[in-house]
Image (spheres, rainbow, N blue to C red):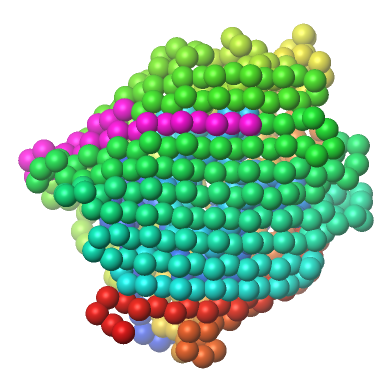
């Protein structure tokens, strides 16, 4: 089904789903603690910057096979996947480019120094505890890449007792998955281990081929922590390793091996009753090796991150810290070899103010980058609570992305590139009259400058001989509306975005970014069972700056069910693309037809104080 005006699709989704949840008794919304927006713990209901949270219960019930499937059910988090499982997936936040989204795993940057965008398609939800999504620039808190926003993925942890769990699943396209986990928490030592494996024959990733392209992924998540007096020491490791099959530009079937890993050692704790400190040393690996050629791309990054948080009086929470990273990039593509070491250091300062009905935040970061020198970014935000139900907020911030090693030294590389930069303004209001309803409206205006594009000698933008230049400018102006409503036994989450993502130099709509998107998730609880429907509507959008291809709009619906069948045993069922719609996320690439997946899970636990 092709939708040329997703306004109709968005209205249809809302009108169809709202009547179903207007009866029975209200249940409280679950508000949790979030940390990504300010690098400190905040109540999500009262934070200045709205944060989308995908919790563990939602992840388990979804039956998703990678993080990308979890993100695409939120409007304004636009996804373009080049085919099926394991294929490259681009994520666009608020009209920014796909490499303008910073991706963190337990606070460690995953974006590589080669292609910019993190390999979200390689992260198995089986090892994920929750995901936080913050839209808008966060360079003052995190540095480079955080122009469109930040996606932070938190791996599995347990609070107390012993937990043993295992699962197995199967489904369409000869898909099979297995996972197992062991977590134990005691007074002297806490430790956990998750292992998972996913294998699928997939489906033809290109529209002009009938050859299936498969994917296999084995993941490990391990951690151990112990008290050191008033402090806590933690060692953690996550990795994903596997192979993805795809087609090259000539439609030749090829495959590549991948390896992604993060290892971190962290010490944190209070210095006194008002100051706390956290010191983390991490090592990140992002590796791709082609099996039919000598091409490869490797990033290894070591980072020291030291953060200090102090309560000043009753109204101010001050955060200050420094980071230092050493990034080593080696790559070879189309005969061009990159071997580059880059040092980046930065210092940051943030003040959060809260008094009565007023909240404010101000943050600054100065980055000293070996390649382009110094760069300073900032953010200010303010929130006012009119009463217990109504509040309004405003914020402004700047962001930047440092050119990566491939931009500077790869094919068409230019060592004289400047950083890409952004300026953003956001105004919003929220209505939270009770424990069962939350409504948010946000307006935003983003300006993107000095965007890096590939141009020829005459300044023509396109896939022709030339080199990278800072020549393009873009703007995105939009409105976001979100609704959360809980009335037993129903839960509804709906989001809609209307925006105008425009290339200011050409006047064209930015590629693979729709002017209108809408999503809705409806869940009904019946005893130990949860039944759900997820709907996504996306408007038409151009595929590329280099062609006139336009990707038609679409609407797709997925169904899910999850419930207990006996003590310790649960079963999950998912049907993707329920109505078997033919739709496209990237021109020339297929998406999944109707498909079904079943997962059986077993959990055994002994909590503290229980047998």
Observer-nearest residue: 155 or 242? 242
Observer-nearest residue: 405 or 259? 259
**Residue 236: percent from left, percent from top:** 42, 49
Name the residue located 80 percent from the left edge and 49 percent from the top edge.
Answer: 245
| Magenta-colored segment: predominant secondary structure | strand
Observer-nearest residue: 275 or 302? 302
The quadrant of the picture occupied by the N terminus is bottom right
> On screen, 255 above or below 334?
below
Observer-nearest residue: 429 or 51? 51
> On screen, 66 above or below 234?
below
Q: Is 587 left, or right, of 300 in this rendering?
A: right
Residue sitting farthest toward the front:
188
Name the residue located 51 percent from the left edge and 50 percent from the top edge.
Answer: 238
Q: Is 538 left, or right, of 325 in this rendering?
A: right
Which stretch is magenta? 298-322
**Residue 77: percent from left, percent from top:** 56, 49
Q: Is 231 left, or right, of 115 in this rendering?
A: left
**Residue 110: percent from left, percent from top:** 52, 40
Magenta span has 308? yes
Name the residue located 60 percent from the left edge and 50 percent from the top edge.
Answer: 240
Residue 430: image quadrant is bottom left
Count how many numbered circles sit on residues in the image. 0
Residue 332: image quadrant is top right
| Residue 79 in view here | no
The quadrant of the picture occupied by the C terminus is bottom left
């Amino acid at each position: 089904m092709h939708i040329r005006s997703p306004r109709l699709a968005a209205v249809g989704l809302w009108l169809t789903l709202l009547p179903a949840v207007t009866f029975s008794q209200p249940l409280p919304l679950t508000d949790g603690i979030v940390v990504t927006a300010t690098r400190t713990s905040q109540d999500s209901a009262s934070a200045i910057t709205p944060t989308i949270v995908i919790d563990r219960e939602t992840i388990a019930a979804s039956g998703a096979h990678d993080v990308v499937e979890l993100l695409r059910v939120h409007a304004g988090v636009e996804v373009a996947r080049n085919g099926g499982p394991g294929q490259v997936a681009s994520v666009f936040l608020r009209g920014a480019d796909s490499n303008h989204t910073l991706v963190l795993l337990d606070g460690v940057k995953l974006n590589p120094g080669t292609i910019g965008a993190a390999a979200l398609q390689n992260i198995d939800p089986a090892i994920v505890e929750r995901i936080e999504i913050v839209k808008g620039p966060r360079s003052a808190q995190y540095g480079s890449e955080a122009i469109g926003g930040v996606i932070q993925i938190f791996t599995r942890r347990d609070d107390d007792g012993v937990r043993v769990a295992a699962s197995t699943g199967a489904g369409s396209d000869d898909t099979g998955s297995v996972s197992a986990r062991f977590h134990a928490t005691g007074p002297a030592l806490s430790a956990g281990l998750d292992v998972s494996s996913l294998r699928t024959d997939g489906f033809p990733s290109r529209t002009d081929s009938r050859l299936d392209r498969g994917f296999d992924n084995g993941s490990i998540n391990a951690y151990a922590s112990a008290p050191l007096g008033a402090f806590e020491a933690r060692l953690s490791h996550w990795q994903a390793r596997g192979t993805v099959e795809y087609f090259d530009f000539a439609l030749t079937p090829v495959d590549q091996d991948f390896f992604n890993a993060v290892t971190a050692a962290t010490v944190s704790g209070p210095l006194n009753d008002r100051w706390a400190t956290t010191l983390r040393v991490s090592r990140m690996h992002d590796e791709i090796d082609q099996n039919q050629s000598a091409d490869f791309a490797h990033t290894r990054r070591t980072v020291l991150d030291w953060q200090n948080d102090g309560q000043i009086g009753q109204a101010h929470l001050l955060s200050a810290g420094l980071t230092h990273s050493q990034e080593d990039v080696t790559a070879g593509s189309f005969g061009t070899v990159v071997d580059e070491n880059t040092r980046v250091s930065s210092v940051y300062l943030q003040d959060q103010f809260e008094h009565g009905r007023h909240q404010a935040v101000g943050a600054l970061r100065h980055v000293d980058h070996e390649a382009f020198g110094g760069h300073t970014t900032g953010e200010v935000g303010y929130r006012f609570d009119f009463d217990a139900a109504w509040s309004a907020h405003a914020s402004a911030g700047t962001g930047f992305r440092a050119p990566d090693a491939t931009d500077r030294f790869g094919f068409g590389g230019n060592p004289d590139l400047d950083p890409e930069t952004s300026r953003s303004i956001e105004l919003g209001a929220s209505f939270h009259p009770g424990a069962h309803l939350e409504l948010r409206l946000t307006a935003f205006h983003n300006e993107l400058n000095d965007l890096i594009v590939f141009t020829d000698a005459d300044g023509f933008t396109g896939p022709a001989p030339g080199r990278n230049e800072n020549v393009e400018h873009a703007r995105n102006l939009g409105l976001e509306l979100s609704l959360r409503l809980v009335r037993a036994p129903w839960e509804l989450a709906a989001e809609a975005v209307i925006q105008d993502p425009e290339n200011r130099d050409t006047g064209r709509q930015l590629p693979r970014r729709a002017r209108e998107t809408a999503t809705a998730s409806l869940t009904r609880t019946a005893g130990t069972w949860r039944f759900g429907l997820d709907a996504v509507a996306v408007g038409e959008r151009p595929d590329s700056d280099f062609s006139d291809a336009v990707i038609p709009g679409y609407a797709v619906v997925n169904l899910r069910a999850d419930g207990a069948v006996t003590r310790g045993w649960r079963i999950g069922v998912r049907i993707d693309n329920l109505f078997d719609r033919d739709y496209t996320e990237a021109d020339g690439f297929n998406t999944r037809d109707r498909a079904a997946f079943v997962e059986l899970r077993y959990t055994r636990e002994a909590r503290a104080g229980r047998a």
